[in-house]
Amino acid sequence: MQKWKKIGLIARPTKAKLNWWKSFGMDPCAFQLKDSIYRVFFCGRNNKNISLIGSFDIDLKNPNKVFNFSKKPILKPGKLGTFDDNGVTASCVLKEKKKLYLYYIGWKPRSTTRYSLMTGLAISTNMGKTFKRFSKAPILKLTNKEPYSILTAPFVMKLKKNKWIMWYVSCNEWIRPDYPKYDIKTAYSRDGIRWSQTGKACIKLKKGERAAARPSVVYEDKIFKMYYCYEKKVGKYKIGYAESKDLKNWTRKDNLVGLKTSIKKNEWDSEMIAYPYVIKFEDKKYIFYNGNTYGKDGVALAIENK
């Protein structure tokens, strides 16, 4: 069983008091700026409930030290009619030479189903202060194997120069207009930009489950370790965990994850914990995540307790 020390909410819209950020702190993702200083990107919502991407910095040696909040969004919704015209959500950030690749989620309301969630890419040349879209179109495509407009929540790892891998959420079917079922699939790339989708699930749903979402992978002890969230009932996400030695076959070991909802009623994480993003710093893992109502109260952090 893995053990974690919950630091709690480290970034809250009520404390930040920013004009653009009024609620939520969904899908945090982080990269190392320098030494113990990391930059965290997240999705906040404005007073019109539109999702925007912002950032803050944190000192992992003093995790209560959170500073340098972006005074304005670093990525806004796309042009009217594009896949991300109703909102954008950060999902994964990767440093490639002197650039940052920010893989993000584009939101678009639909007429027959609740939403469309597709994967976009934005690139920064100034360590995340500003970003420019690589394309106005999604970087993952609808196919005969994946015909539904939920190809989202990507996590990308560069294995070597010409071998990149992405784990992402892919819709299998809509049960009704507000109830999709989705799991986690895999795609490959030579440059991190153009992707080949396998259409095969690596994290399959168990009986009675509705969704597996937001994968995050670290390599440790010669094992690839994936953290994600899963649920049976809408709004009741739990953190899951799986292992693989070959990146093809994954074994779910959800009982080992060790990070659970609060036992106290009415706590910010008493009903659900979701959207994990795991990094390794020195000899410990750090997990950024969200609580109730898909992160309405902000960004949380827990540290591996060895």
Image: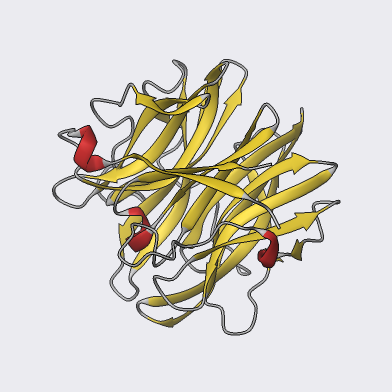
174 to 8, vertically: above or below: below
Q: Nearer the viewer, residue 169 or 262?
A: 262
Report whether 1 appears left or right of 237.
right
Q: Position of residue 77 (x, y in %)?
A: 29, 42
Report whether 206 appears left or right of 233.
right
Report whether 283 appears left or right of 18.
right
11 to 259, vertically: above or below: above
Q: Is residue 187 visible?
A: yes
Residue at position x 66%, y 46% in the image: 217
Check the image and name the residue furthest to the front: 264
Q: How many marks?
A: 0
Residue at position x 43%, y 23% in the image: 128
Q: Position of residue 281 (x, y in %)?
A: 63, 29
Q: Quarter of the image for the N terminus: give it.
A: bottom right
Q: How is the image coloured?
A: secondary structure
Residue at position x 59%, y 48% in the image: 4
163 to 51, vertically: above or below: above
Residue at position x 30%, y 64% in the image: 266
Q: Position of residue 296 (x, y in %)?
A: 29, 54
Report whether 291 appears left or right of 19.
right
Q: Position of residue 56 (x, y in %)?
A: 37, 28
Q: Is residue 200 visible?
A: no
Q: Quarter of the image for the C terminus: give it.
A: top right
Q: Nearer the viewer, residue 74 or 283?
A: 283
